[in-house]
Amino acid sequence: MFVRKKKISGRDYYYLVKSTRIADNSWKKIERYIGLNPPTKKEIQLFEKELSSIAHFIEFKEKILSSIINNYNQKIKRSTKDELYSFEEELLIKFTYDTNRIEGSTLSYKDTKLLLQEGISPPEKPLRDIKETENHKKAYLFMKKNLSKDITAEFILELHRLLKENVTEDAGKWRDGQVRVGNLIPINAAMIETEVNNIIKWCTENKHLYPLEFAAIFHCLFERLHSFFDGNGRIGRLLMNFILLNNNFPLVIIQNKNKRRYYTALQRADNGNYLYMVKYLVSELEQQYGYLI
């Protein structure tokens, strides 16, 4: 394992690099973006230990995951058009309800279902919550329409524009000021575009990773940037599922009832530990699609 320094737009960015054996028995260099400061010896040791832990956990869960993935895709193939439409619609409603509820939406599951299926707005609920529910459906459908394409800065901005259109004035724009998220102070606004492009470059270089690990790490890296004033979680969860769906995984819904575990996973990832997020996503897959095992 070694540290690689890259100079981008005059700034130094640090990566940890490890050679590891992959599925076809060849060797591949795995890079993990660390940040603007050189990693300590302890961080290097933790990174090496974590890579091994994630690989062992995925190997341990491989049979269950393969069963879920294969049976899910068989269900899709065997469904009639009407069955597939109903199944996809239920997933969209559930996903929209949970992802918005995590961010404080007051709409119940019933409210969300009536709004998205029948166009019936729930009475005495904030207009913002109603609009963002409608907008999330548009963003979700845009994401699904563009499956198989690569993640780009333009794609991320368009998702945000669709989500926040007629809700906030900065729809489709990176934040231009400093924010604080709990104890985390994200990067300066002036660095967002560069850092987003670094993550996109990381995507290009790490597509060999197991899809669930790839999606989990990407999600954590993206959330840490906090690229927008509002909507980061919802955009991040759309992008995470964009990666999973592109790799024939079923949609993974971060359920509101499990948000404490989700937030804990994000917090641990801030310290370089992505294993907990991988474990959390596997647990959600088992809860949501366990009937397919």
Image: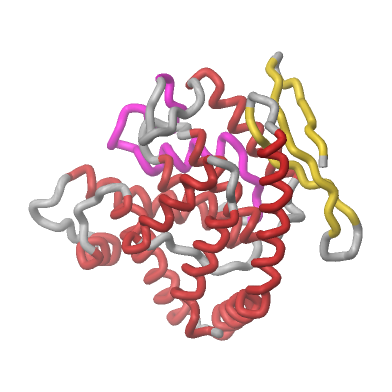
Name the residue: 70% across, 52% down: 49
Task: Please tell me which residue lies in front, 93 or 63.
Answer: 63
Question: Looking at this rendering, what residue extends furthest in the front direction?
Answer: 42
Locate residue 85, reporting x and y percent: 44, 74
Q: Position of residue 30 (x, y in %)?
A: 78, 47
Residue at image position (21%, 62%) is 108
Q: Residue at x 47, y 43 (%)?
A: 159
Q: Extreme top residue here?
A: 10
Lateral position of residue 59 relative to residue 154, left or right: right
Work out whether 12 lies above or below 117.
Answer: above
Quadrant position of residue 90: bottom left
> Which colour scheme appears in the figure?
secondary structure
Work out whether residue 183 can be spotted: yes
The kind of secondary structure the magenta stretch mainly shows is: loop
- Residue most toward the right? 26
Question: Total of numbered circles in the picture?
Answer: 0
**Of residues 240 and 127, the one drawn nearer to the viewer in this rendering:** 240
Viewport quadrant of the C terminus: bottom right
- Residue at 28%, 37% (x, y): give it: 167
Location of residue 284 in the rendering, given as x and y in whole percent from the top left corner: 47, 68
- Give the x, y percent position of residue 248: 63, 67
Quarter of the N terminus within the rendering: top right
Q: Which residues are magenta?
A: 148-177
On screen, residue 101 versus residue 51, left or right, reads left
The answer to whether residue 77 is visible is no
Residue 256, quarter of picture = bottom left
Image: 120 above or below 142? below
Does residue 262 sit above or below 291 in this rendering?
above
Q: Is residue 166 magenta?
A: yes
Q: Is residue 86 magenta?
A: no
